[in-house]
Image (spheres, helix red, strand yellow):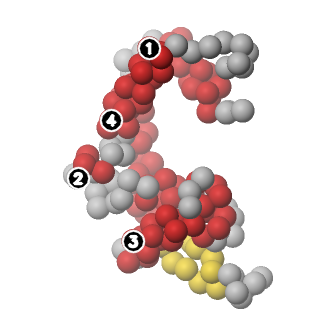
Amino acid sequence: MTGDHNPVDDGQAHTLAAVLSVLMRRFKLEPGLLASSAYADLHANDAGLLSVLTEADDWTVRTLAQTLGAADSTVSSALDRLEARRLVARARLERDRRVMGVRLTDEGISLVARLREAQLGNSRALLARLTSVDRDQLLRLLALIAQGD
């Protein structure tokens, strides 16, 4: 059933927004809550960019921007920050020397592993409040929402 056939009222939308805000804080993804976490010193967008870079691909600023749905300039700024911290490296691609490729450094790979472990810990803590049946239902519904159009 699509959204066209199943209208959502404003109360439901406000509730979802509020719940997502709490979940974002729990996952320590809001800039003010990064201190003393695996996300310390990262800009809010950097954790997502680091995660995408773990996927096998010949990443460029353009392909990263398309994958993240962000402007090239936003991705470039994030890469500048991450490169300054030695978490990513840029180099000319062998297949096209005009294009700069992007990859995680060993330090970046290590940080992504810590980030994922923190996310798993947060996920376990949140899911532990639910019964097994409720967890399965929640995950099924979230996967349905994440599919998009």
Residue at numbered disc 1: 11
Query: Rounded to the nearest whole Å, what is the CA distance between mark 4 and mark 1?
Result: 23 Å
Residue at numbered disc 3: 81
Say which of 128 and 86 sits in front: 86
User: Could you tell me which residue is drawn at 43 percent across and 39 percent down?
Assistant: 120
- The answer to whether residue 49 is above or below residue 102 is above
Say which of 129 and 93 sits in front: 93
* Residue 56: numbered disc: none
Residue found farthest to the bottom: 97
Q: Amino acid at mark 3?
A: Arg
Left or right of 128, for residue 74: right
* Residue 35: numbered disc: 2
Residue at numbered disc 4: 26
Image location of residue 47, percent across then percent down: 44, 55
Quick one: label 3 or label 1, which is nearer the N terminus? 1
Q: Amino acid at mark 4?
A: Arg
Q: Quadrant of residue 24?
A: top left
Query: Rounded to the nearest whole Å, what is the CA distance between mark 3 and mark 4?
Result: 24 Å
- The answer to whether residue 41 is above or below residue 58 is above
